[in-house]
Image (spheres, coloured by chain):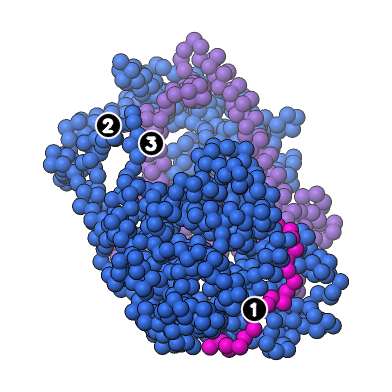
Chain colours: A purple, B blue
Amino acid sequence: MKRRFSILSSIYVIIAGATGIIILLGFFFNLESWHLQGLQTILLDWAIVVAAFAFLLGAVNVVRVNVMRVRQRKGALYSLVTLAAMLLTLTLGLLDGPQSLALQWTFKWVLVPLQATLFSLMAFFVVVAAWRVFRLRNLASVLLLLVAALVLISQVPLNFPWAEDLAAFKNWILAVPAMAGSRGIILGVTLGIVTTGLRLLLGIDRPYSE
Amino acid sequence: MIYCPKCGTANLEDSKFCTQCGTALEPETGRRCPMCGALNPPGNVFCDECQARLVPVVARPTGPLEMPAPFKGLSLPTKPLEEPEAEAPAPQPEVPEPTPEPEPAPAPVERELAEDEEPDWLINLRAKYGRGPVEAEMEAEPAWLRELHEPPVEEAEQEAPDWLSELRRRAEEEALAPEEEVAEEEEVPPIAGVTEAVMEREEEEGEEAPPEWLRAIREEVPPEEVAPGVEAEEAVAEEEELPDWIRELSQEAVEEAEEEVAPLAEEEEATLPDWLAAVVPPAEEEEAVLEAEEVSPPAPPAPEVEEKAEEEEKITAEAGEPPDWLQRIAPPEEVPAAEVPPAEEAEAPEWLRTITSAAAEPPPPETEREAPSWLQEISAAGEVPVFEEAEPAAVEEEEAMPSWLQELAPTAEEGPPAVEELLGEEAEEGAIPSWLQEIKDMEPPPLEEPAALVEAPAPPEEAVEEEELEEVPPFTVGVEKLIETPPVPEEAVEAGVEGVVEEELAPPEVEGLAKATIPAWLMALRPAEAEKEPAAPGVEEEAVPVAMETTGLLAGIPGVLPAEPIIGVPHVPRPPAEVTVPGELALEAKLLGEVVAEQRPAGVVLPRERAQRLARQVGRFLLYLALITAVLLPYFFSTGLFDESVPPAPETEDFYRAIENLEPDAVVLVAFDYDPSLAGEMNLQAEALVHHLMRRGLKVMTLSMYPGGQALAEQVLLSAAGLYEYQAGTDYINLGYLPNHPASLRAFAGMNPLVGFSYEGTPVQETLLGQRISSLSDFALIVELAADQQTLRWWVEQVGSQYPNLPLVAGISAGLDPYVRPYYETPGRRQLKGLLVGLPGAAQYEGLTGRVGRALDNLESQGLAHLTIVAAIVVSNVVYFASRFRKGK
């Protein structure tokens, strides 16, 4: 797509490219000798502030959405509970800080158990899925089932004579086939990151101005 | 003069554009063909390439460049609306005669009409309905003459006017200069001559003046000038030339005449209408009448009756016995040709002399040569005697006939070959032109023409002798076919010829073929509309109101534009055809519809569905129960399935050695990058790690890129700090939350010194431990406890790349093993010095540190849960194959 030339967009490209290049140079050179270390630190601090500011935006959005649901009477009870919990946590944190006893108690006995419980339900889902999905319909499913079963069993040290062989098999699976696949994925992601970075530095992609 | 190729206007020699239409004129160096665009020599009348006519057929204008503006887009033949001048000269075409090249087919010549002219079809329509501007004028004409001018609308729109005008023109030309025409036409091939004659006739009739006979009628010449003797001759001649549809139209006149006709002995007087009978002069005045006939109205009704009588006689002779009513109409006695003196013939009007000569003499060869071929075919079928009479002129005929026709036509001595012979001789068909062959093979034309033939009164029996049939030219075979299969018009039924026609219409019975019968089931499905009684063939449906024109030239004429109301009627889709279903089938269909439409009542569950649902619920409950049992069972007693020694994995040993190799009082940075959802797995690693660090006296600083991670770190630190008497700010510091972004890690890596506040809100630089750290290089080890591949990668990329000598180890969730292991398995220089993987890694690490923690207890529960999942997979496949095996049986 051919873009129109404008001074404003050129300024955007120059700022983004210069920022990216300065940060990138820090991976290859000692910026202190170039008196660019301070500039890099300032830019990174700005990035941290901007990233932290996203939390504030998220909090505002949560309030807006739940207030709207309460007005529309769509799950108003859940939205009211959410808004009340959010307001209580924010109040406790603002009053006595994150290390306050009340906030620590809330975190330890409310947030952690709830999240752990929700995650532990995954074990039941996995069992049901294994019962209903893992069917030996073809060769690929047979291979998948065998490997999954052996890796699951070998995750824990069995008290069997062939436990060592089973552990060696699991290590081989993880070190050779699984690592080959994961390396390919990592290399692909890295190449994508490099490409995206170059497009941003060269001004081909301008997510900041569009 | 240069004639405009578009409008035909005669322009001056040097003209570049037409004075009437502005069309660019070609120079005299050549004539551009309007059809194919080929350039022809200036003298060419027809194109050398496509044989299209180059010079339009234009009559001599009455004045220089006074040609009226033509009607655009009309090509129908016309006749002048206004009264023509009586002294108008005989039509003399100004255009040169066509070249003797034969044309394959008479090309239709479009002629533009003058403003003062009206097309024939319009005049005919007005005459038919007795309305319009020419009503008074048409009423002056006798009925038979109007009928003669009233071809059916369809015929008028087609080609009937062309050949009719041709007949009239030829009659006029022969009357004017018969000797010159004969001599001239002997040099012209018949087909080309016919074409040219038709063209010229159109021009003469349309632009010059109407025929004299018509003018005479319009001028209301006293009927006393009509010669009855000539009428008989004219009847014979016209009968030979008039087409079938004319005979059909005159059928009504014949029927009307039957009521008034006297016995056949007095046919001339008896067949005349009253008005004409009154003006018929006695035989002694015949000569005087002929002298005055140049301006007198011809065409008495008697020849029409005679003509149709001859026609019907011929047809009836072919079909069988003529009906009684036909026999009552005796043909008039043919007036011998010798009775018409040549001198009188010269003085007679053109059309009358033509007809007279046709009746008195053997039909001149020009008749066949000039008439269109299709007309010859049609007329030959009913006018066989013409050829017999034409035998005396055989010499001239043979000279004028084209070669192909001479081959087909029999010699005078041999006589014409039989029709059957000609039909069977394919070799001779090859000699026939293609266009004639197509006419022979074509299917019967519209029903009016053959119907007219059937309706036509039968001629006297003596006119259809066998000798005459033998003289039927070969190209009349197609006409016989047309005559054989005409439908029965109502007029014919009324006239009593239905018997003859019905025999002809009866489908031939084919032996060996049985009549097909429709099966009963198909009859049951037949639409109800088909079972309705069809309307009687003779009963017409309800008459559709015909729109009548109220304005314009067509005012007062109904049905002129019949397509308009049909187009205007909005399309209404026809309802689907009704299907009559027998009673039993209808009952079954009704029951089926009720069953299909019936829905299960809400809340009603079939027993089988209830059993299946119950089985699924029970199976799911059993799975959940097995999993819960497997998880809880190790808390009550040991199963003995697992090795409690838990041999450590290599990556676990590396992790352990990385911590053991640290100097005492070294500072270790631990990142709790996981949230409470994975705390059940990751906290076991963190607890084992923190215990190991504190047991060795290492200083600990923690942070997290998860909001909940800083709280988890605080809990782990607090749980171990009391055991090892560690003090916050001195021995350990929780740095709190670091935004989850690579830039924050990069900034943290470049932080020099550490700034900010601890989790408790204490400035880091105000703590003793914080003062020891000026940069990340001051840390002895970095431990990344990651539940997400992304945070681990950030640590490797943003921190490990900047501090390559700073050792980095990681404890990860078991699900990240495939993604994180490459950083540990890096050949040469590992990016991760050690690795703890999941709960087994924590248990192994506890085994290495010698601390009995929760990891070992939970490991047995996890192992039993894994075995339960594998067992579920195996059992489900057994059930699956068992069910397939049962279904296979």
Few, some or many residues within 10 Å of mark 3 (<14, 14–19, 20+): few
Query: Which quadrant does the N terminus of chain B fall into?
Result: bottom right
Q: Which residue is mark 2?
A: B616
Q: Is residue A71 magenta?
A: no
Mark 3 lies on a secondary structure that is helix
Q: Chain of mark 1?
A: B
Is the residue under label 1 in contact with that under label 3 (CB below 8 Å)?
no
Q: Quadrant of the C terminus of chain B?
A: top left
Relative to the observer, which residue lies in front, A93 or B111?
Answer: B111
Q: Residue at x 33, y 37 (%)?
A: B509
Label 2: how many Cα within 10 Å (few below 14, some 14–19, many 20+): few
- The amino acid sitting under disc 2 is Arg
Q: Secondary structure at mark 1?
A: loop
The residues tagged by marks 3 and 1 sit, at their Cα atoms, a distance apart of: 108 Å
Q: What secondary structure do most residues of the magenta stretch adopt?
A: loop
Residue B311 location in percent, x, y? 42, 58
Query: What residue range appears in magenta?
Result: B83-102
Mark in front: 3 vs 1? 1
Rendered residue at 44%/54% (across/down): B463
Where does residue B241 sit, x and y in percent of width and height? 52, 63
Image side of residue B506 versus residue B207, left or right: left
Task: Check disc 2 and report its element: helix, strand or loop.
Answer: helix
The percent coordinates of residue B359 (x first, y second) are: 51, 64
Q: Earlier in the sequence, mark 1 or mark 2?
A: 1
Mark 2 or mark 3, which is nearer to you? 2
Q: Are marks 2 and 3 on the same chain?
A: no
Q: Give the amino acid type for the residue marked by disc 1 in the picture.
A: Pro
Image coordinates for residue B36, horizontal then vertical, percent: 73, 62
